Image (cartoon, rainbow, N blue to C red):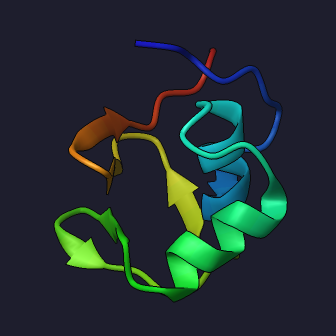
Amino acid sequence: MTQIPTDDPTIQLDQFLKIMNLVATGGQAKMVIQGGFVEVNGETETRRKRKLRHGDLVSFEGTTLQVEFDE
């Protein structure tokens, strides 16, 4: 599991997808999110600015990752 270094206890969904290398660009992140291909905590999420918090589960193309922040 990769931890995200940040001072903010949230991260936007599109940024998370890029940081975790699930997509190559912000444009690709926008397309897959708005296209309904990404789930957050088991539910389809179409808002790319959705704030993720510690413990959230993000699923895309058969990969599920849990959001974790460095302390």
Residue 54 visible within the image: yes
The image quadrant of residue 47 is bottom right
Q: In which quarter of the image is the N terminus?
A: top left
* In this rendering, position of residue 27 left or right of residue 46: right
The one nearer the camera, 38 or 70, is 38
The image quadrant of residue 41 is bottom left
* 43, above or below 67, in the image: below
Measured as percent of width and height from the top left, residue 15 is found at 73, 51
The residue at 81%/60% (across/down) is 26
The residue at 59%/31% (across/down) is 20
Measured as percent of width and height from the top left, residue 58 is found at 36, 51
* In this rendering, position of residue 23 left or right of residue 45: right
The image quadrant of residue 8 is top right
The one nearer the camera, 38 or 52, is 38
* In this rendering, position of residue 60 left or right of residue 10: left
Numbered marks: total: 0
Residue 9 visible within the image: no
The residue at 66%/63% (across/down) is 29
Measured as percent of width and height from the top left, residue 12 is found at 69, 61
The residue at 51%/14% (across/down) is 2
Q: Quadrant of the C terminus?
A: top right
Measured as percent of width and height from the top left, residue 18 is found at 70, 43
* In this rendering, position of residue 46 left or right of residue 66: right
